[in-house]
Image (spheres, coloured by chain):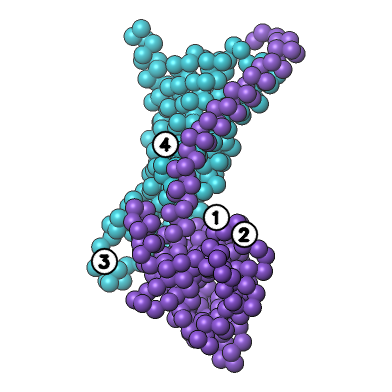
Amino acid sequence: MDTGSTKNRALVSKAINKDNPVVVQVLGICSALAVTVKLEPAMVMAISVTMVIACSNLIISALRNLIPSSIRIIVQLVVISTLVILVDQVLKAYSYEVSKQLSVYVGLIITNCIVMGRLEAFAMSNKPLPSFLDGIGNGLGYAWILITVAFFRELLGSGSLLGYQIVPQAFYEAGYHDNGLMIMPAMALILVGCIIWIHRLRNPELMED
Amino acid sequence: MKNFSNSYIFLFSAVMVVVVAAGLSVTALALKSRQEKNTRIETKRNILSALGISSSAEDAENLFDQYIRRGMVVDASGNEVSGKEYDDATVASGEFPLYEAAIEGRPVFVIPLNGKGLWGKIWGYAAISEDGNTLYGVTFSHAGETPGLGAEIATPEFQAQFRGKKIFDSSGAFAGIRVLKSGSYVPDDHSVDAVSGGTITSNGLRDMVYSSLRPYVPFFEVIKSR
C-alpha cells in the first residue's frame, strides 16, 4: 500500500516537473499562446483542461478492456469531445464573461495533444485511479506553465493582474509604458522558451546534446 | 488486447453514441434557460454601452427598462411600421428594427450593426442622436478577432472615438464613418483612427457601419425634419 501511494504521488509530481507536458514533451503549446494574455481566462482554461484530461483518462481507463482496439481512437475522441462540450456548456451558463474571452479555445481543448497523448500512452494500459492521477498531474503541469506565462504577460503587457491595476498610475505619469509586445502571441512563445531554459538549468539530465 | 467480433464493435459504437447523445441533450436542456438569460443580458449591456451607460450583469435589465423607451420597426421609406416590436418574428425584409432610448429626456436611436472582421463575425450597436446625423455612441463586439490587434475594436478607448462623429458628409450625403490608418488620419467629424495592425478588421468595421446604417437613412431624414 505504501509503495502504491508513493507511486501515485510520483505520477502527479513527475508530470508537473520532470515529465511536464508543455516544457518537456512540448505538447499543448498552441493554447498556451492563445489564452495567456490575461490571467483569468488562463486559469479557467487550466482548470478546464485539467478536468477534461483527468475525467477522460478515468473513463477510458475504466472502459479500456471493453474498447475494441480497432476503433479506440474514435472512442477516445468521442469521450474527449463530450467532456469538452460539457465544459463549454457549463461555462456559457455559469461564467459567461470568461467563456466569451476563451471563445473558440474551449472547443479546441479537443485538439490539445496532451489529452489524447495521455489517453493513448497511459489510460489505455493502466488502472482507473493511476490514470485519473496521471490526468490531474498532466493537467497541473499544463496549468502552472499557462498561469506563469499569463502572470507575466498581463503584468507587463497590461499592468494589471486578474483585471486589477497593479502598476500605479504614478509610474505611467513618470513615463512608464506597458509593453505592447507582451500582448502578442510571439511573446508567449518566448516566455515558454525562458521557462524551458530555467527548467533545464535546474534539471541538467533533461538537456539534449 | 482481445480480438473483438465485428458485431461487438457495432454494438459498442451504437451504445456509446446513444449514451453520449442522451447525456449531452440532457445537459443542454438543463442549462438552456441560464444560457439564454446570459445572452439576453449581454445584448442589453451592449445596447446600454452604445448609450454610454456602463452596467453589470446584475443591473443591466433594470437599467435597460429605465433608459429604453420602446423597440420599433421602420420601413424602407423611413416610416414607422405600427404595432411591431424590435424582436417580432413578423419583421419582414425591407423592414428595420431599432430601439428608441431617452437620455435626459432627449430621444436617442439605437441601431444594430452586423458585419465581418478578419476571422469571423463582428457586431455592435450605434446610437444616433435626435438630429439623425451625430453618433451618440457605439459599441462593438467580435467573435474571434486577433487579441491586441483586431480585438481592440471592443475596447472603450477605440469606441470613444466615434462619439460626436457625423454620418452624413458636409454636402448632406450619407457617408458612414471612415476608419483611417494613423498615417493618413486627420481628425475630423467623419473619421476615426484605425486599430494599428488590424487593417482588415478596421475595414470590416467601416463597411459594417456603412451597410448597417444605410437602410435607416430615410428614417434619419424623417427625424431630421421633425
Across and down, in percent, residue A16 comes to: 41, 30
Label 2 CA crowd tier, 10 Å (few <14, some 14–19, many 20+)? few
Closer mark to the observer between disc 3 and disc 2: 2
Q: Amino acid at mark 3?
A: Gln
Q: Chain of mark 1?
A: B
Q: Which labelled disc corresponds to residue A169?
A: 3
- Secondary structure of residue under mark 1: loop
Across and down, in percent, residue B205 comes to: 57, 69
Chain A palette colour: cyan
Q: Earlier in the sequence, mark 4 or mark 3?
A: 4
Q: Residue furthest right?
A: B6
Q: CA distance from mark 3 to mark 2?
A: 52 Å
Residue in the picture at 59% in, 92% down: B171
Across and down, in percent, residue B204 comes to: 61, 67
Closer mark to the observer between disc 1 and disc 2: 2
Residue B19 sits in which quadrant? top right
Q: CA distance from mark 4 to mark 3?
A: 33 Å
Q: Amino acid at mark 1?
A: Ala
Residue A3 sits in which quadrant? top left
Which residue bears the numbered disc 4?
A47
**Foreground pick, A181 / A115:** A115
Which residue bears the numbered disc 2?
B90
Q: Amino acid at mark 4?
A: Ile
Residue in the picture at 40% in, 17% down: A8
- Secondary structure of residue under mark 4: helix
Chain B palette colour: purple
The reply to whether label 4 and label 1 mark residues of one chain is no
